[in-house]
Every structure is written in structure tokens, then in C-alpha cells.
Amino acid sequence: MSEVAASAPVAESGDGGSSTDGMIGQLMAAADAVAAKGLAMSIAGYDAQAASKHP
């Protein structure tokens, strides 16, 4: 009984903040994913150029 009562306020506060924090978190996660993909592509491109210049 005490565990349910203790977790209920946490769930409510999380749901209350998720409308804004959730969107910000999703945007940041998406931006991180794009940045990571771009970084990986640039590294792959650099590796390809280096390999072609130095066989």
C-alpha cells in the first residue's frame, strides 16, 4: 500500500511536466540523433578520402 502511495505523486508530477519537458526531450534527442548521424557520415567520408589518397 505504501509503495503505491509513494509512486503515485511521482507519476503525477512526471505526467504534468511531460507536456513541455517531453517535447523538449524529444527535440533534443532528435537533434542529437541528427548530429550523431552527420558526424558518423563526415567521419566515414573522411576515412574514404584518406583511404583514396593513401592506398
Image: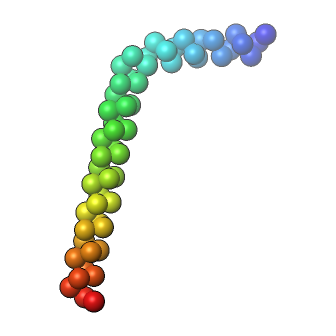
Residue, x 32% and y 32% (percent of image)? 27
Residue 14 at what x, y percent from top left?
51, 18
Residue, x 76% and y 12% (percent of image)? 2
- Within the image, what quadrant is residue 10 found in? top right
Count of number-bearing discs: 0
Q: Locate the N terminus by quadrant.
A: top right
Residue, x 25% and y 88% (percent of image)? 54
Q: Given the current orientation, which residue lies at the most extreme bottom position?
A: 55
Horizontal arrangement in the rendering, residue 2 relative to residue 8 (left or right): right
36 shown above or below 5: below
Nearer to me, 10 or 18:
18
13 shown above or below 37: above
State the colouring used for the structure image: rainbow
Residue 38 at what x, y percent from top left?
27, 54
Residue 3 at what x, y percent from top left?
74, 16
- Within the image, what quadrant is residue 43 found in? bottom left
52 shown above or below 34: below
Residue, x 63% and y 12% (percent of image)? 8
Q: Locate the C terminus by quadrant.
A: bottom left
- Within the image, what quadrant is residue 20 found in? top left
Residue 19 at what x, y percent from top left?
39, 16
28 shown above or below 47: above
Q: Given the current orientation, which residue lies at the most extreme right position?
A: 1
